[in-house]
Image (cartoon, helix red, strand yellow):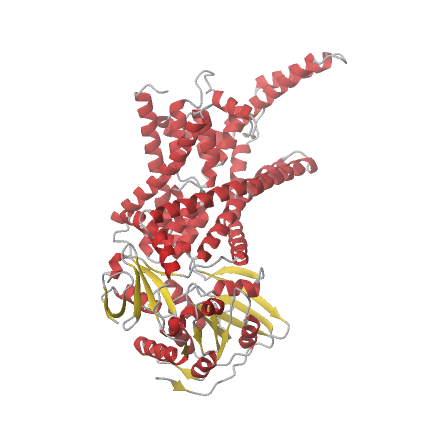
Amino acid sequence: MTTEVGQSEARPRTADSARVALLGNPNTGKSTLFNRLCGARQKTSNFPGTTQEARVGLVRADDHGAIELIDLPGVYSIELDMTEAALCRGMISGEIAPRGERLAPPDVICVMIDATDLGRGLVLVGEALRRRLPTVVAINMVDLARRRGVHADEGRLADILGCAVVVCSARTGEGVDRLLSEMARASIPNRTPPGDASGLERWADEVFAEVALGDDRDEARTITDRLDKAFTHPVAGVGAFAFVMALMFYVIFKLATYPMDLVDGLFASLADGVRRVLPEGILADLLAGGVVGGVGATVIFVPQICLLFFMISLLEDTGYLARAAFVMDRVLRPFGLSGHSFVPLLSSHACALPGIMSARAVPDRKDRLATILVAPFMTCSARIPVYVLLTTILFRGRPAMGAIAFVGCYALGIIAALGSAALARRTLLQGKSRPMALELPSYKVPSLSTALLTTLDRGLVFLKKAGSTILAISIVLWWLSTYPIVEPPPVATDLRARAAALVATAGDDSTDPLYESEMLLAEAGLLEAIHATRMSFAGRLGRGIEPVFRPLGFDWQLSVGVLSSFAAREVFVSTMAVMLTGEEDTETEGILDRLARATREDGVTPVFTVAVSWALLVYYVLAMQCLPTLAVTAKESGSVKWAVLQLVWMCTVAYLAAMIVYQSLLLFGVR
Amino acid sequence: MEQGQIGVITRTLLQEQDAALLRAMGLRPNTKIRVCQTGGPWIIEMRRSGGACSRIGLADAIAAHIHVGPF
């Protein structure tokens, strides 16, 4: 065994705290240990100039002082030519640090290896030992290894490595206290493995041969074999995948309704409260309409986002997702994408922001860029209010047809995404998608606490990243659609005067004039709202761009709706409700009826004709109308040019497709 | 190889990046393997002494470049 031997050195560190970098292969339970130790005392930080994240947490143990844990990205080797490996190398050498952390090597490296396959993790242990930093080796998942009859002599391993070795189970908590103690008093190991790759592999094999206990057994793991066969089968695998996804989305949409309604109600009450407390004026309008409205519009989607991450975390923990990636690899490969792209595309069905962020897991750069570019074609939850409005208008009293149209919208988004990916991979991002090689982790019961902490972490990241952008955009849009404040139209003033006169002349017991007065006031309010919208900056812009949308059948009011929803699609529904009915509430049947019957300025032609409604539906399925998505695309792709390309491509496809639909319907006599 | 067969990796003829990743994942010459599934994807169980093992899934395009000899 080629091993240099030296003296074990104690290394000075700050009086009562140690900074520990948690290094390990993927699927070794690093995150489970991190969550067990830090709980909610953790934050996610980016490495400057990259999209890679590290979680940083604090452990306060009475007899160990404070330990700051840094959960590094999972790597098979820190010497690989991959972003994650480069970050681990830089972090360990003290050249880079997560944002907000000091630039210095960690006080201790804790290398986590899988007890069920010790041999594989030893190469990473060797790479860490060569860094000459205080090191602790944690052999995790010992409970699973025991069940499989896999044992190792950890005492002998500690002697060979020259550092502390702790057997533990992050899931059950076994050995975790001892691991903390060893982290707090770790010293520089007195062994240094060979530096070259093949020498290190030989060293790892020799070390493993010395510490492995038990007999070699060649029996097949039949249950795992059967499950793998079913989950990756060309037919049964697709069926299982469809079932799992249908169940997941059913749970997400079903359960999210309750917290979403609650959030909606809370923000509505908050806006009412602001208007009651503050005097009428700019400040009340800004706070109630811009700030509370804007924040509410973001927070309302948080339950769906959190549920999605919760479900994905549970699924990932079971070991199923790695198998599903291979099923989807077959489907995605003809379009130039790989199975790695499927989780980002799946997540984009809730919201494109976390979907694009999760594309970091796609190892090949061109695959990753193609995934980011097409992810916003997937039907996100913000499109749903628009789909509901338009399918209801198109298929009143025919819910089955409405449902088919709804599913068709989802299908159109997926087709557009795959078609665009295929085009991108044959032009801008030429080259074949890299074939997949993926570890298939053991099947296990998922950890609820890990899923909950992951959900909390991702939810907060979403709120922080998306909330700030959406809030800023909402304030700008509120300003554009509120200002300038204009005088009410003469017709409305006349109506108000007539209403006042009716009230003045009504007797004490007469109800008819009062009722008529209320009707006149309501009509005056509606006319004032339409006039204000028409004369606002957004309204003027709408009239300005109306010629652009005319080939799609959109009048100026629809143009304002499209324009106002550029930042967030769901704004379209409330904009149209305000402009066409004077009320923002679109939940009631009456409002939908009134929207369906609303006419253009000539008072005869419906705003939502059949042809226009179809064109609008197609436009909203395909158009890029989400500024935060563009911001995240620019950040994750590393260049604004990809965000601009995404915007131009999606809007062009949407415009042309909507125009073709509208003009074709006119051609066939459908108006 | 047939499903269920056990063999030993003799060499790999892959692109440098793929080969390095597979080596780091533990799939390197002299590794004992069991073929759990052939094709679409290939599922390989890497076996070490004492019953230690782990599984990887390989696309056909990668599996075709891995040479395996009898154990």
State the quadrant of the C terminus of chain A. Answer: top left
Point 52% across, 32% down: residue:
A574
Relative to B37, residue A268 above or below: above
- In this image, A576 relative to A516: left or right? left
Relative to A283, residue A214 above or below: below
Q: Quadrant of residue A316?
A: bottom left
Q: Position of residue A378 (x, y in %)?
A: 40, 42
Q: How many marks?
A: 0
- In this image, A539 relative to B32: left or right? right
Point 32% across, 33% down: residue:
A656
Q: Position of residue A116 (x, y in %)?
A: 42, 69
Q: Quadrant of residue A267?
A: top right
Q: Position of residue A272 (x, y in %)?
A: 65, 36
- In this image, A470 relative to A322: left or right? right
Point 52% across, 79% down: residue:
A186
Relative to B62, residue A67 above or below: below
Q: From this viewpoint, is residue A330 visible?
A: yes
Q: Position of residue A365 (x, y in %)?
A: 33, 56
Residue at the right extreme? A508
State the quadrant of the N terminus of chain A. Answer: bottom left
Relative to A380, residue A519 above or below: above
Nearest the eye: A31 or B71: B71
Q: Quadrant of residue B14?
A: bottom left
Q: From this viewpoint, is residue A565 visible?
A: no
Nearest the eye: A651 or A667: A667
